[in-house]
Image: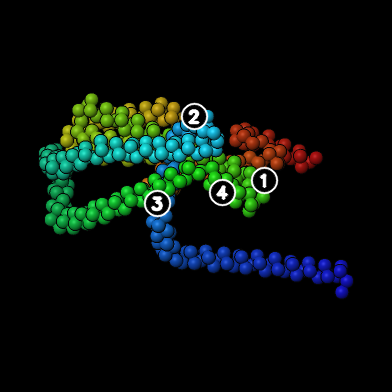
Amino acid sequence: MKPNEIEKDKKPRDRYARVGLMSFIVLAGVVLVFFFLYKIDDVRNAFGTLFDVLQPIILGFVVAYLINPLMKFSDKYLVKFFVNVCKFKKRGAKIARFIAVLVSIAVFIAAISALVYLIVPELITSVANIVDTLPSQIESTIANIEKFFSQNDILASAMTAFLDWEKNFVEKDLVSFLASYASQVASGVIKTASFIWDLIIGIIVAAYLLFRKESFCAQAKKIVYAFVKKQTADSVMVVARKSNHIFSGFINGKIVDSIIIGILCYIGVLILKMPYPVLVSVIIGVTNVIPFFGPYIGAIPCIVLIALTNPWQGLYFTIFIILLQQFDGNILGPKILGDSTGLSPFWVIFAIVVCGGLFGVIGMIIGVPLFAIIYYIVNETVRMKLEKKNLPVETKDYMAESINFISEKTEEEIGE
């Protein structure tokens, strides 16, 4: 058989081999999707188990990411000193990095310890006061409601029905509810102890990550360039840098913003002489980390707690929180966060609702920067596609007034 004939014979076989391989990949993908949907509970449990196993590593990455700005700041000034002191520049840089990592972790541990030392005793005292005074406050509130409703027969009958339901709940369901709650509290204590142990391991992991972060980043970059085309790898690196900018700007900025709001809330509650200042300030500060919905999630239980003690103080606190959140949303937040996400209010709400529904509270916190990255990738892809077609890139060019112009231009190009 001649060489040309051999080459002609190989081409159909290569084509059939590619078709067979693609058919196998598609069939395997269909089987995997079917298995995933059919065994969704088992898959979810498997991911939950994997997450529990990897929790110390995940916490290590989170801690390293949070304290990385402080480490970079320390490393910047320490390197200048140790490079001049040591004979070898590499050795001086390593010593500077080692001390910067230790300083950053020490500051992180000190901050957590200070928060626990200052807040936890006050929280325990506030919760104990609530447990002691809440029954009498509820009885007083119910008595006032009864007095108000007794002036109208229809309202009085509705109130009687409500009180009967309440009595039945207390006699039959409350005991089982408290027993279930007690078991949840015990389980929560065990989980908290486990979380603290994982956090200790995570801090150790964070130290190793920060000490050799350039090496780990270089390894990841090498893998990307090894498996994809250079142009694609360059795009991946651009997206990675943009993602880091969005996440670090949003998460770190939101934490600083929430700490300031918590402190301002504590000062305001003390000035207004309202009960449970530490408990209320912690709730407001922690929930403020959640964009958009966070202030309302934290404010509602605080308003209820204060209103049970004094309804007028509950009203004053509501006004105070509205003013505080207006200050945060219009002055403090934009100063700290800037336009770190580039998302409109609609997409912020969309990201919080979707990610919160899928991943709970963690999803509500990271949903906005995560969706901002997706939004950036889609926006850049659309921009490049339009530039290749020599079409306008700006959104305003596609408003109702500009659509006719674009259509006419396209028709002229087709006519030509």
Residues under numbered marks 1 and 2 in contact, where contact means CB atoms less than 8 Å apart: no
Relative to residue 272, is residue 138 depicted above or below? below
- The amino acid at mark 2 is Phe
Task: Quickly name the residue at label 3.
Answer: 56
Q: Residues within 10 Å of mark 1 (few under 14, many from 20)?
A: few
Disc on the earlier residue, 3 or 4: 3
Type of the residue with mark 1: Gln
Pointer 1 and pointer 4: residues touching (CB < 8 Å)?
Answer: no
Residue 313, how many percent across, how many down? Answer: 20, 30
Q: Which residue is mark 2?
A: 81
Query: Which residue does the numbered mark 4 point to in the structure image?
Result: 220
Label whose residue precedes the other's in the sequence (1 or 2) = 2
Residue mark closest to the camera, 1 vs 2: 2
Residue drawn 63% across the image and 47% down it = 233
User: Which residue is label 1 attached to?
Assistant: 231
Q: For the residues marked 3 and 1, what is the alpha-carbon distance in whole angstroms? A: 35 Å
Give me the C-alpha separation between circle 2 and circle 3.
34 Å
Marked residue nearer the N-terminal end (3 or 1): 3
Q: Tell me the kind of residue under disc 3.
A: Pro
> Viewer-nearest of labels 2 and 4?
2
Label 1 or label 4, whichever lies nearer to me, is: 4
Mark 3 against mark 1, which lies toward the viewer?
3
- Kindly tell me whether residue 175 is visible in this rendering: yes
Q: Residue 136 appears at what percent x and percent y?
A: 11, 41
Q: Within 10 Å of the Cα at label 3, are there few (<14), some (14-19), or many (20+) other Cα atoms?
A: many
Measured in 3D between alpha carbons, the distance from the residue under mark 3 to the one under mark 4, in whole angstroms, is 21 Å
Q: Residue at x 28, y 34 (%)?
A: 281
Spatial separation of the CA atoms under disc 1 and disc 4: 16 Å
State the image coordinates of residue 161 (x, y, percent, origin top left): 15, 50
Secondary element at tag 4: helix
Image-based side of 286 in relation to 416, left or right: left
